[in-house]
Image (cartoon, grey):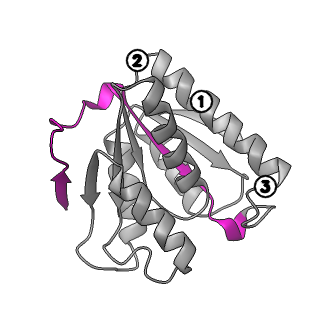
Amino acid sequence: MMTSIREGVSAVKGKQSACCFTGHRPAKLPWGGDENDMRCLALKARIRAAVESAILEGTEHFICGMAEGCDLYFCEIVQELKEQYPHITLEAAIPCPTQSDQWSAAQRARYHELLERCDYETVVSAQYSPGCMMRRNRYMVDHASLLIAAHDGLPGGTRNTIEYALRRGVNVVDLPI
């Protein structure tokens, strides 16, 4: 695991004041990639409310897996809220350096712009492997006391992450899709 800290940022906050996020990629969302769909806008509002509630309850550090879809919504929302709550920090937990290589040009540009604005970057695996995404998810849960989850209830990586968090005693805020 490699960690880099952006200039001017001190050590990562402790687990007690950290929140991570899990959610679906566009292919599993009822609206696909249409972020103007009312259901997507409603989910983004629920994510914002959950993040703001976590901040008001003392959470200072947020960890995002930087996947397409819900992860990027979460990342954008935390970055927007940093304007109102400048004491919070955002960490990008990257499964491997090639995470966004197969995405569209627009999504890659979005990813890199968001990544540039994160306070921390943690690369979990030096190269892609079949288990690197789940290792990233476990890293996030292991470094947080709260997990916000946008989930449809079906099996997959998001559900596995929720189940792992529950086994580890991490509080879960469920945002049904």
Q: Residue at position x 35%, y 80% from top?
A: 129
Number of numbered callouts drawn: 3
Q: Residue 165, image x and y in percent? A: 46, 42
Give whichever of 141, 52 is nearer the camera. 52
Is disc 1 surrounded by few (<14), some (14 to 19) or many (20+) residues within 10 Å?
some
Residue at numbered disc 2:
58
Tell me whether circle 3 and circle 1 mark residues in contact (CB < 8 Å): no
Q: Residue 106: x percent and y percent?
A: 56, 73
Q: Which residue is mark 3?
A: 36
Residue 32, compared with residue 130, is above or below; it is above
Q: At label 3, which amino acid type do we have?
A: Asn
Looking at the picture, tell me which residue is in the foreground, 8 or 156.
8
**Disc 3 versus disc 1: nearer the observer:** 3
Give the left or right position of residue 149, taking residue 89 as reference. Answer: right
Image position, residue 177 (x, y; %): 76, 48
Q: Secondary structure at mark 2?
A: loop
Q: Is residue 86 above or below residue 148?
A: above
Callout 3: SS? loop
The answer to whether the residues at label 3 and label 2 have Cβ atoms under 8 Å apart is no
Instruction: Using the rendered image of the protein, determine whether residue 99 is visible from the camera's viewpoint.
Output: yes
